[in-house]
Each structure stands twice: as C-alpha cells, then as structure tokens.
Image: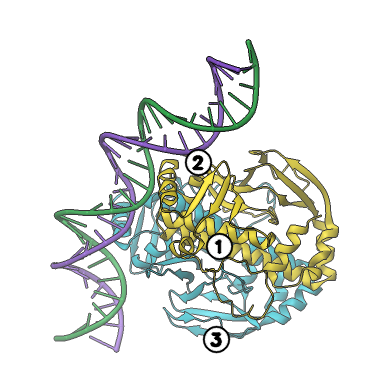
Chain colours: A cyan, B yellow, C green, D purple
Amino acid sequence: MSNTFVVRLAQASNLQPYEVIAIDGACRQTRQVAAKTYLSRAGDDAQSFPVILAGWAASYQILRNGARQITRLLLPGDAFYLEPVHGPMGGEEVTTISACTIAHVSQPELRSAMAALPAVGEAMRGYAAMENAILANWVVNVGRRDALERIAHLICEVHYRLSVIDPELGSTMFFPLTQDDLADVLGLTPVHINRKLQQMRQEGLITLKSRQLTICNHARLAQIAGFDSLYLCPRAAGAQMPMPAIAA
Amino acid sequence: MSNTFVVRLAQASNLQPYEVIAIDGACRQTRQVAAKTYLSRAGDDAQSFPVILAGWAASYQILRNGARQITRLLLPGDAFYLEPVHGPMGGEEVTTISACTIAHVSQPELRSAMAALPAVGEAMRGYAAMENAILANWVVNVGRRDALERIAHLICEVHYRLSVIDPELGSTMFFPLTQDDLADVLGLTPVHINRKLQQMRQEGLITLKSRQLTICNHARLAQIAGFDSLYLCPRAAGAQMPMPAIAA
DNA sequence: CGGAACATTGACGATAATCAAAGCGAGTGG
DNA sequence: CCACTCGCTTTGATTATCGTCAATGTTCCG
C-alpha cells in the first residue's frame, strides 16, 4: 500500500489520486527499518525504489572534515533513489531518523505504467519538480536566513508537508529530529540550535519535548519564517488541493 | 537547435545523444534576451518551456527583507519552468545574468515524444534527478562550507557543467557573475566575497577580471572545495561519458 | 542501577555582516 | 577628446552572529 506516495504524487502534479493510483500496483514489498539505519543503494534491489510509508528518513552528505549536511528530509509519502545520478554531483547517502516502514516500488512496472498512462509520467515529473522546489527553498533558507528564521521555516515546511499526507494533522506532531539532527539539517551547530530553541519556547512559539512538537503560535512562526502559508497558486486556483489549516 | 539541451539530457540520463535527439524537433523558436532581464513565467507560452542555448541565467527568490538568494545557475543546456509547482514551496523567479539565447521547447510535442520513445521520458527524469543532485550539493555548500570553500566549489561546479557542454573548454571561461551576484549565489555579502576573491588571487588559485575567469590551479581549487572531480561513478563505469579534463 | 544518548550551560574566539567611503573603468555625451 | 556618470570593486573600522571547547544535567532504556 503505497498510499502516501500516491497522495504526494497527486499533490505534486495537481492530479486526482485515482488518476495516479496505478502506482499502487507496482508496490512489491514492505519492510520495517529501525531508527538510524543506513540505507544503502546497493542493498536495495536496483530494479525498485523505496517509498517511505511511515517514519522519517534523511539523505545527507559527509564532508572530508566529518561534518554532515542533511539535504533532504524524507517524510511519509516521499520516495528516494528515483534515478541514479552520474558524475561528481552524486554521492548522497540515506539514513533513517526514526523507525520507518518502507515500501519498494518496482521500476519496470512503473515504467510500464508510465508508458500506458500519461498521467503517471506527468505525476512523476511533478513530484520531481516538487522535490526541486523544496530543495530550492532549502538553499534560500540556509543561505539567507538567520538561525531563528531557519528553524521556524523548517517547522513550517515539515508541518505543511505532513499535513498534505494527513489532513487531520493538528498543531502537535511527531518530530524525531534530535538537536544534532536539526543542526545538520539547518547548517548550524547543536549548541546554537539549543539556544534558539529555548528562545522559541520562551517566546511561546513552540513546545518540543520527547519527539513531540507543538506549534503554539502558527501565525507568528510563519511570519518569522517568511513562510507563505497563504501563498496563492495561480495555476492551482480553483483546484481542490488538500490545503492545510495553517492559515492565521 | 536545442543541441546543448540534448547533450545535457544525454549526460544526465547516461544515454547517447542520438537516443534523445527527438527533443530537437520540439524546439519551436529562439530568441535573444539582454542581460538582467526578468523572465516571467506568464509571458512565455504556457505550452512550452525555455532552454538556455547560450549565456547565463539564474532562478532566485527574494525575501521580505529584500535579500536575494539565487537557487540555481542556468547555464547553456539548462531548461527551466519544466513543471509548475503548486503550493507554498513555489515562488521562484528567473532572470538573465548575461545576454542569452533561449529556445522554447513545445510541451505537447515533448509529451508525444515521451509517449513514443521511452528513452526521452527517461532522459527527462534523469535531467530532473541531476537538477536535484546539483541543488543538494548547493545545500551542502551553503550549509557546511566556509566562504573560501564555497567559492571554490562554485567555480569547480560551473567549470564541470560547462565542460560537459563544451569538451573543448580549457581553464579560462566566460564568467559573468558580479561580486554581488556571487554573494547572492553563495549566501554571503559582496564585501566578504571581495575579500575572499582577493585571497584566492593572491594564492594563485584563480584570475578573475572583466568576466573572464581562469582557473590557475585546478587541483588545489578542487581540494579546497572538496569537489570530487575524480568521483568514481559505479553505475557509469565503462560508459563513455564526456568526462572533463579536470583531473589533477 | 548504570550507561548512553541527548540536552543544557558558560566562557571565549572566529568568521562573516554591517556601515560608510573611496577608487576604478567602461561607456556616454558634450 | 575630455569630463561625467554609473556600476562595480576595493578598503577600513566596528559589530554580531554563530562556532568551539568543555563541563554538567537530564532522560530514557535495558
């Protein structure tokens, strides 16, 4: 049941889930993976790619000096290792953050589905475009926002992405990133993360304890983050997207 | 003649150019665009997407405080506005950096080509994956490298990408980014860029004057940048990729 | 109970930002 | 042909955000 992936594809391509549900048939097996497990590309069947059904994972790079930078948070519904990348720009690894349920989608069957149903190919391209947009936002985040804004933006982004998959999601959510993880996501140090988190707690923005995050003041958080929750999407206007209830 | 784009697609998907050349037929018109021109998405025919044939462009975001972050350098062979992105993660603009020659590829014809030739669809997915890899590298760059390393890495990356399109490319190249542009690419201030550039010149790493960049010591530059020019690509092993002559 | 992973605190240092001014260089117009 | 201007680069002085190092608390889990 790659349900979550279907939802993401539909969201990314602005199609209806039933137009994309063909993916579901290509889902071959599902496995449980413990937290902090290294997911090797080689280990997986090269003829399939993994989709997160539940839990969090992350793709990252390690620099020569040992520093780690997480490049992408993989939330329920996200797929990875979609296509191998050749040349010097490759080199990403993937690890689980929390325990995960991971499905494997058959590449050959997916290819057949894309050949038969144009909507499936379109959905996959839309998904890739969404990944791109998220990454571009991340560059902006890390490049031009200070520590407080970065953390706020990350929280808004994660909340938004989770709420697409789970429309019932309220202001409290599972948030398995340690402060060390946060540092590696945001390009900061754990110590600095700690201090800014405390500041955010003092200002009544969030609550974060034992992997439970509560957004206490979403309006202000989004304002600090510069996160356009009310973003008006011209092409999607009128379309019934699962717009989350994160409006002020 | 969207030649450059064909080369990039082939490189990204590890296919041969002749397998992808069908794209060429979908190229409808070509136009000249002056430097520092804003390229609006609405202005372009929604049924086509632009490809840079010559010159440099960039996609960027502007923050509320007026800061600009360039998220992607668009070099010859790069396409943009491939797919619209819905939701709060969108919001990218594109501008030219130098004067550009831009081709427009017909989306409907491309869709037909993808339906008829699986290799074309594969190439497009490979291209999207490459974009992703570049963006992920950028996140690493901005998140975990200091100013000197960032500049060095940018130069290595640009040189690599240009050399894929132009195998004849030597150590001197057209480099139209001003120091202000560089700052917006790398998430720094122009003043700081200036100082680090001088340092690099003093150390005999590069020469940069009137938009001409020369890499004087590629080995050391790549070493500082942590740029794996000798990256061994397992899946591409044996494949005759246009590997640039940037080895030490 | 004990240990490991995670969070918190403090003192200090360094990289990069900010502010402001001056220099340079290419193209323009008188 | 020479001043003039505009965009870009360079420089200096000062500030601040964030990093580093190191120690102490705390929570969770077997």
Q: CA distance from mark 1 to mark 2?
A: 42 Å
Q: Chain of mark 2?
A: B
Same chain for the residues under marks 3 and 2 in the image = no
Q: Residue at x 62, y 74 (%)?
A: A84
Report crowding for label 1: few under 14, some 14 to 19, many 20 or more residues within 10 A (C-alpha). few
Determine the image quadrant of residue A182. Answer: bottom left
Residue type indicated by callout 1: Pro
Task: Locate residue B147 relative to residue B110 in the image: left or right.
Answer: left
Residue A224 placement (x, y as % from top left):
42, 46
Q: Is residue C27 above or below residue A55?
A: above
Asked whether residue B98 appears in the rendered view, the answer is yes
Q: Is residue D6 above or below residue B242?
A: above
Residue at image mark 3:
A43
Q: Chain of mark 1?
A: A
| Viewer-side label of 3, 2 | 2
Report crowding for label 2: few under 14, some 14 to 19, many 20 or more residues within 10 A (C-alpha). some
Residue at image mark 1:
A167
SS at mark 3? loop
Residue type indicated by callout 2: Asp
Determine the image quadrant of residue C27. Answer: top right
Task: Locate residue B196 relative to residue A101 in the image: left or right.
Answer: left
Residue B23 placement (x, y as % from top left):
81, 61
Asked whether residue A163 appears in the rendered view, the answer is no
**Is there CB contact under 8 Å for labels 3 and 2?**
no
Report crowding for label 3: few under 14, some 14 to 19, many 20 or more residues within 10 A (C-alpha). few
Q: Using the image as rendered, state which of residue C24 and residue A57 is in the foreground.
A: C24
The numbered mark at residue B180 is 2
Q: Chain of mark 3?
A: A
SS at mark 1? loop
Q: Using the image as rendered, state which of residue B153 and residue B187 is in the foreground.
A: B153
Q: Quadrant of the N terminus of chain A?
A: bottom right
Q: CA distance from mark 3 to mark 1?
A: 34 Å
